[in-house]
Image (spheres, helix red, strand yellow):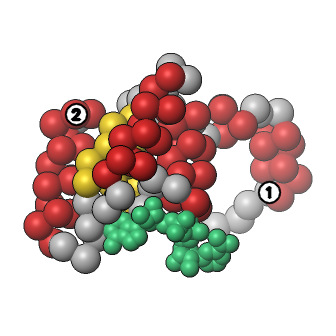
């Protein structure tokens, strides 16, 4: 497929970050989302409009992270999840569906 690179560049430059990355109505699941790189990802996704389920084996840190996001008027929830447990992953995915659709 032919891509007109100059036209593509101009299209991008005329858009704000929120226009480029608009995740309103989307649901995101972030494992290890309570701190570090995962929390950074949670913040960026929620700022872009996604509802984010923070999955972490550190429940207290996940709950605090979700509260901090909600205090900014954004959408997040937390669930204790160990990513090495298939059952925990299934529960988290089901919970995301129940909470955010
Ligand atoms: N921070 C860096 O600069 C850097 C650079 C390169 C690679 N990495 C790698 O990237 C990964 C994340 O780094 P980080 O700095 O964000 O780490 P971190 O330790 O700050 O955060 C990891 C998060 O994952 C959670 N977690 C760990 N095991 C889990 C499990 N089994 N189930 C659910 N949650 C779990 C922890 O509770 C914590 O909240 C690590 O593997 C790290 O080695 C980090």
Residue for badge 2:
99
Q: Position of residue 22 (x, y in %)?
A: 56, 35
Q: Vertical placement of 47 versus 61: above or below? A: above
Dot 2 or dot 1, earlier in sequence: 1
Q: Residue at x 64, y 67 (%)?
A: 1
Q: Nearer the viewer, mark 2 or mark 1?
A: 2
Q: Residue at x 24, y 43 (%)?
A: 96
Could you classify mark 2 by the number of other residues whose Cα lies within 10 Å: few (under 14), some (14-19), or many (20 or more)? some
Image quadrant of residue 44?
A: top right
Residue for badge 1:
4
Judged left or right of residue 62, residue 13 is: right
Q: Residue at x 71, y 65 (%)?
A: 2
Judged left or right of residue 32, residue 12 is: right
Q: Position of residue 75 (x, y in %)?
A: 42, 29
Disc 1 element: loop
Disc 2 element: helix
Q: Position of residue 50 (x, y in %)?
A: 45, 36
Could you classify mark 1 by the number of other residues whose Cα lies within 10 Å: few (under 14), some (14-19), or many (20 or more)? few
- Residue 29 seen in render: no
Instruction: Name the residue nearer the viewer: 40 or 63.
Output: 63
Q: Vertical placement of 52 versus 55: above or below? A: above
Q: CA distance from mark 2 to mark 1?
A: 42 Å
- Residue 2 seen in render: yes
Image quadrant of residue 83?
A: bottom left
Q: Quadrant of the C terminus?
A: top left
């Amino acid at each position: 497929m032919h891509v007109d690179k100059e036209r593509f560049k101009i299209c991008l430059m005329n858009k704000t970050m929120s226009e480029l990355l608009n995740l309103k109505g989307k649901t995101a699941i972030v494992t290890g989302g309570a701190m570090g790189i995962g929390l950074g990802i949670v913040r960026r996704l929620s700022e872009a409009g996604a509802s984010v389920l923070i999955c972490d084996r550190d429940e207290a840190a996940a709950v605090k992270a979700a509260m901090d996001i909600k205090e900014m008027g954004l959408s997040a929830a937390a669930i204790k999840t160990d990513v090495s447990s298939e059952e925990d992953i299934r529960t988290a995915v089901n919970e995301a569906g129940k909470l955010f659709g």
